[in-house]
Amino acid sequence: DAKTTQPPSMDCAEGRAANLPCNHSTISGNEYVYWYRQIHSQGPQYIIHGLKNNETNEMASLIITEDRKSSTLILPHATLRDTAVYYCIVIYNQGGKLIFGQGTELSVKP
Amino acid sequence: NAGVMQNPRHLVRRRGQEARLRCSPMKGHSHVYWYRQLPEEGLKFMVYLQKENIIDESGMPKERFSAEFPKEGPSILRIQQVVRGDSAAYFCASRQGQGATEAFFGQGTRLTVV
């Protein structure tokens, strides 16, 4: 079973920041938070991952709370091409398999 | 550096036939995962393999399904005696190794059983 909880859907206006929340209250100390997205029926695409510290790359930022029980993925300037299902996944760092929950269906609207 | 390559992209099989799905991981990746996505459903883990070893097959159906990742060549997911319920998208992912490394997915094989 997935160890995360996400809202089933969200809307965002094009050009605005999209903030996607994720709860992982049972996360343990050596488990990482990963984010993937699936656009239409394509293969899932890796976005970002982190352990404790906030992370940023060319796609997004990941903000993890100090107690690590929740996190937020931020797409700073959402475009229509960011419309997808976004998955927050917690995995043990030693070769753990990705267990996908239901994710958040993000709709970016003009 | 080519990404994860899956072939064929689309596969049509009649009920009772065998389906063979291939996955070539990214260069230098020795860990392979297979997932199934039924129409309008989420991604379900099937099996995790390293070279010549099955590490975790907890998501594999008990019958008709098998997977291998030989020392040379791609990983193969084999479905024997296919049934209509096997129609789905099958995705493969590869990972460099243990530790906090990301897994990269292929574009999937869409299996249709007629």
Image: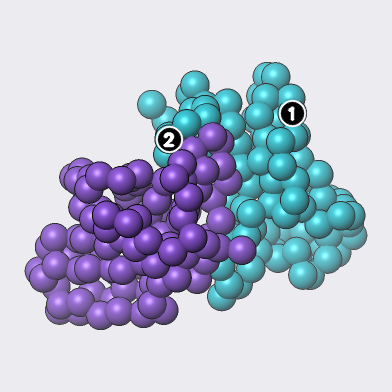
Question: Which one is in front, B5 or A88?
Answer: A88
Which quarter of the rendered picture does the C terminus of chain A lie within?
A: bottom left
Q: Residue at x 79, y 70 (%)?
A: B84
Q: Is residue A37 visible?
A: no
Residue B7 horizontal/vertical position (percent): 60, 43
Disc 1 and disc 2: Cα gap in Å? Answer: 21 Å
Q: Which amino acid type is shown beneath numbered disc 2?
A: Ala
Q: Do marks 1 and 2 both belong to one polypeptide chain? A: yes
Q: Is residue A36 left or right of residue B107?
A: left
Q: What's the residue at 44%, 64% (across, down)?
A: A25
Q: Which residue is mark 1?
A: B53
Quadrant housing residue B41 = bottom right
Circle 1: residue type: Asn
Left or right, B49 with respect to A58, comes to right
Colour of chain B in the image: cyan
In the picture shown, does residue A32 fall above or below B114?
above
Whether residue A43 is situated above or below residue B83 in the rendered picture:
above
Residue B1 left/right relative to A12: right
Viewed as shown, does residue A85 lie left or right of B22? left
Compared to residue B29, the image places residue A23 above or below, namely: below
Q: Chain of mark 1?
A: B
- Is tag 1's residue or tag 2's residue first in the polypeptide sequence? 1
Q: Identify the secondary structure beneath mark 2.
A: loop
